[in-house]
Structures are given as structure tokens and as C-alpha cells.
Amino acid sequence: MRLSEFSDGRLREEFERGRGSLSTLEAINIELKGRDSDEAFDLQLEVVSVLAVLRKASTGTSGPADALARWTSSYLFRRSLQSPDGRALHRYRMSDGEYDEVRDLLRNSTSRLLQEDGVAASVFVVFCAEWFRREATSLFLRWDQLNSEALDAIPHGTRRRLAAIGLKFWRRELLRSDGAREFLLTLALEGGISAHVIAQGGSSWLSDYLRTVMRFALSDAAAEHVRGYAHDMSWMVRVSFRQEGFIDLRCERIMKLVEWRRAADAAPVGIDPVSYLDAQNPDWRNSLPIHVPPDNEKIARRLLGGLLSEKAGSVVASGITVERYLSYDGQRWVPAALLNAEGEIPAAKLPGLSTFGRWKASPSGELANFLPSQIALFEPPTDDEPTWRVRPVTPLGKLLVGLDLDRSISVNLTCGSEAVPFAWPGGSGSRSPIMSFLPENAAEDGEPKKLRLVKTGSASLPSSKVCVLARAGWMAVPGEGSPTGRQWPASGKRIVHEVMGTTYFMKPRAGSDERYRVEAGKNERQESLEISGSGSSSIETMDDLEIMVGPVSFGIHGAGSIRPARPEELRVRKTGENWGELTDRRIVTPGVYEISWRDPVADIQLEKRKIAIVPAGARRPQARDNNDVAS
């Protein structure tokens, strides 16, 4: 009977019988590489461990294996350790010389890596983590990023198994997400974040997050307060990176920068803080919990200079985005928006703009009723600054009260005689019947005067209290054991409901297709419905209809990527027709469609959108029926 016909349990029995046979274990290891069950994976870890001992006994002291073991022992010895102590790998602070050594060792150890040798796996893991700490330029994770000459010949499946084996040696946990093992994400977080990612604009959300926490730390330097604030603001961090260790490392870096900021405050007026610290304390960069390349002054200046130049004071949002709010006017809640126009945009996101001049941003559409003719300046990329730098030319710190939540926000970018329309990032209007808000800036009586939009449709949020905007006439039914919250009137025939616990929202006489669930004090839903057209349309509507240029594609956005919908997760219907499952990721035919994103297990609707698909260049006719599409 061949091993391929054995069950996982039978393979384990064969392993126990043949523990002392190198050839038997080699054959079992080869068979297990093609299996993906958890039982097979755990068994392979044991097989590889025993194989390493047998190989060493049968071959004596082979060069590469012995060199790898000696390097690991020496690496630990320099840190006064005999074995790993369980700390995150970036906290070992690998030196430049050690990094060069381990790269060369792995380059000459391909056969050991392919055999999934335990010693080679431990070196593989520490090298990969350090690569992310030093060389990564993006937070979009792919195994191909690690295709350095040291690892070119190692298949992705082998790398995953090496990661699992090596992490056990270093006494580090393999992260899981929705039950799936996150090999590459674990290695990236073990290494921390490369300076290149921030300095080269590889992650705008991370830059915005660091600046926000830095401003708070400058006004309140108590470490515990800063750490608490950093975790409170973790909603700004991409979901997959929202790990306690990741947030703590960012906080540690901020606190060290605050310490050096205090020293930089002693510099004479007009002196660059980075240059001053370099002159007064040449080794100050080495104290930072991040690898700053010693031979790259541009990265050091962009990475450190920007944060060191932050001002203490009120903590406001930064970045190039739009935040939606509700503002209380004393009688009811009214919609509002806050435009942020300070930060950087990667050049690849503005391919149509000439880089030979500065562009001025002027509000268009309904935004022009709230702001003056010029609101921001777009500075083109340079050799030193490879991203577009955006700064406001008019104060934007006040809420634009009265700007409806469903209004999209766009501007016109002009440079000389050239003009380019630009949809402001995060400025898409929301037409969901259910929107969840969190309170901000409570008044003296403890009641908030401002609510910030955080989710649309069904939502699970960690806050103990959530305010939900729903249409008047909709029922709000508390779940079992949840209290009935208060209600307040809102503009546009809507009601704000206070949710503590679980509350179901539904239209009267509606089925489960129009039933939403909002949970307070629960882990946040980490995905969102992604609907994207082939272009922007100039047609505006006053109802909940979204106009999109066809064909239109659909997916579920989460963890930095878009996945296809699972069975029964997306439904579609034309106006007046019955619901049917959306089996294709695209709709090509023009028309008016309702899209329902559901949780088929919980039997609730997560989000519902109504879209009109129009051909490119379509215009609104002089008169049209509500169920017709512009043509």
C-alpha cells in the first residue's frame, strides 16, 4: 500500500514505527508536503524535527548545517542568551554585519531549506523578519517580495512550512485570521515596519497614524496615556496590522521621538531639528526601535524630520481624506463633513497630472457651497520627495455642517490652462439606510455634540455605545438582554438611535433581506462591500441611487485585498423583480440594480446599495422616469 493512500492517522502510526529510519521519514515528509489538513501539518513538524537529528547523525558535521547552527548560537550568545527567550524578533536588533552573514549563509544552504531542516528553518525565519525590518517598501505582502538571491529556489509552500518550524524555535506564535494561518503577515510583524515604507510613501495610513499619536504625545507625555491613546486610535490602522505588538512598537517609537524632541527644542530658532540632534548626539538614531539606514540621509530626514516637526496641541485628523459626521444643533442631528488636505499621495495614484508645476484644488459640485475657490495646493514629486505633497491654503478644521452624507466630494485640479477633475479620497457619499456613529467631544452635561461615521449597514464595534442613524419608520428591536436606547430626531426624516448591546433594524413588514444588526462592545467587522465602476459619471441624483459607468465589478474588501463573494453572500435584483444570487463578479448591462450583501449564516443583511449602470459619456435627459437610466 502506497503512502499516498494512507490517512493522516495511519501516517502517524507509520511515523511512530519508523522513527529511527531516515529513509522512511524522508518518504513520509515528502507525502505530507502535499497535504493541507491541520493534522498533517502538525505531524510534519514532528517528522522534520526527528529528521534533523537523524540527518546530523548520518552525515556527521556537514559544512552548511554546522555553519547555520554556529551562527544561531553565536547570535544568541552576543545577547547573553543560550536559547530564544520569546521576544519579538525585531527586538534582537540584528546588526548590519549579522544581516550580511545570514544572507550569505542562506544563499549556500538551499538544500537544507528544501529539506525543511529545523536549524535552517530557524535561520530562515530570523532572516525574513529582518528583511521586512530593513528592506520592505510596501505593506502589501507577497512571498515574491522575498525573492532575494538567498531564497529564489525555495517554493512558497516550503517557505510556509519553514516559517512554522522556525517560529516554534524562536518561541513565537503563528498568527491566525478567521482560522487561517497567516505565515507572511507573522514574519512581517515580527520584523516591525521598514523605514522605507514610511519615508517613500508606501503607506499613507501608517504615516497619518504616527503623526496623530505624535501630536497627542507632545501634549501628554505620560507613557500609559500615550499607549492608551495609540490603541484607541488603532481604527486608523489597517485591520491585518491591528495587533497589540504592532501598536505597542509604534507607541515605543513615538515615546523615544518625544524624548529627542524635548532635546531638539533647545536648538536655536531656525535650525533643523534633525541636524541639531546629529551634531549634539551623533548616536541618537540608534536608540530608535526602527532600522534607519546609516547611508541614506534622505530616508532619515523624511522619516524623522516630519514627525519631529509636529506641533503639540489639539489632536485633529490628518491625511487626504473626508470624514463624515452628525452635528447636534440643539434640536436635532444634522449631517456634516470634515475635509482633510495635509499629507502625501503616491505618484501612481495621480497618473494624469503633469509633474512640471503645482496644481491648485478648487471645490466642485455641492462642496463649492461650503468652501472658497481654492482649498489646497498639490506640490509635484521631486528626486528627494517621490510623492505628491498636499497642503491646505485655507483653514479646513471646522465641520462643513449641512453637507449631506450622500453627497460625493470632488474638486477640480488646475495648473495654468489645464484642468483635471479629482474625486477626493474617501469622499464617496453614503446612501445606506443604516449608519453607525461614535460620539466625540462630549459637552459639560456629558452629552456628545458630534458623532463620527464609522460603519454603514450591519456593524460590530468595540465601543460600549453606538449611535445609529436610521430612516424614520424603521423598527429598532433590541436583542435578548440588550436595553432599549434613547432616540433623537435627525434631519431628512431620520432618527438617531442609541445602541448598547445588540439591536436589529428593519423596515416594517420587511423580510430578512432588509434586516440589519448593530452590536456594541463586540469585535469590529473587518470587511466591506466593494463596488467599482469603469469610470466616474457627472450625473447626480437626489435619492439613494448611485450612478456608475459600466461594467461594474463587485467584491469584498478586507485585510488589504479584495476577495470574491462566497455562495449566497451577494444578491442582486432589478427594480421590481425578485432577488437572485450574484454569481459573476461583474455586471455589464446598463440598468438599475439593488445589491444586497448578506451574512447567510446569521441571516442578516450587512449592506444594501442601489446602483444605476450607465454607458460612458451618458447624460441626464431633460425628463426621465424614476426607473429609467440616463442614456
Image (tube, rainbow, N blue to C red):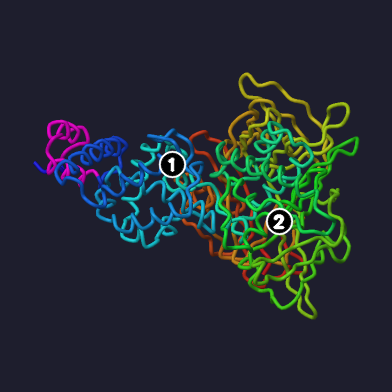
Task: Provide residue 287's location: percent of width, then percent of height.
Answer: 61, 45
- The residue most toward the left is 1
Residue type at mark 2 is: Ala
Closer-to-camera residue (338/144): 144
Q: Which residue is mark 2?
A: 279
Residue type at mark 1 is: Arg
Taking the image as drawn, is residue 53 in sight?
yes
- The residue most toward the right is 330
Q: Distance of mark 2 from mark 1, alpha carbons?
A: 30 Å
Residue at figure coordinates x 60%, y 30% from the top left: 522
Quadrant containing the C terminus is bottom right
Left or right side of 43 for 169: right
Disc marking residue 78: 1
Question: Nearer the N terminus, badge 2 or badge 1?
Answer: 1
Helix, strand or loop under label 2? helix
Answer with the quarter of the image where residue 199 lies.
Answer: bottom right
Left or right side of 598 for 359: right
Decide: is 612 above or below 581: below
In the image, the segment drawn in magenta is 6-32
Closer-to-camera residue (182/587): 182
Quadrant containing the N terminus is top left
Closer-to-camera residue (100/321): 100
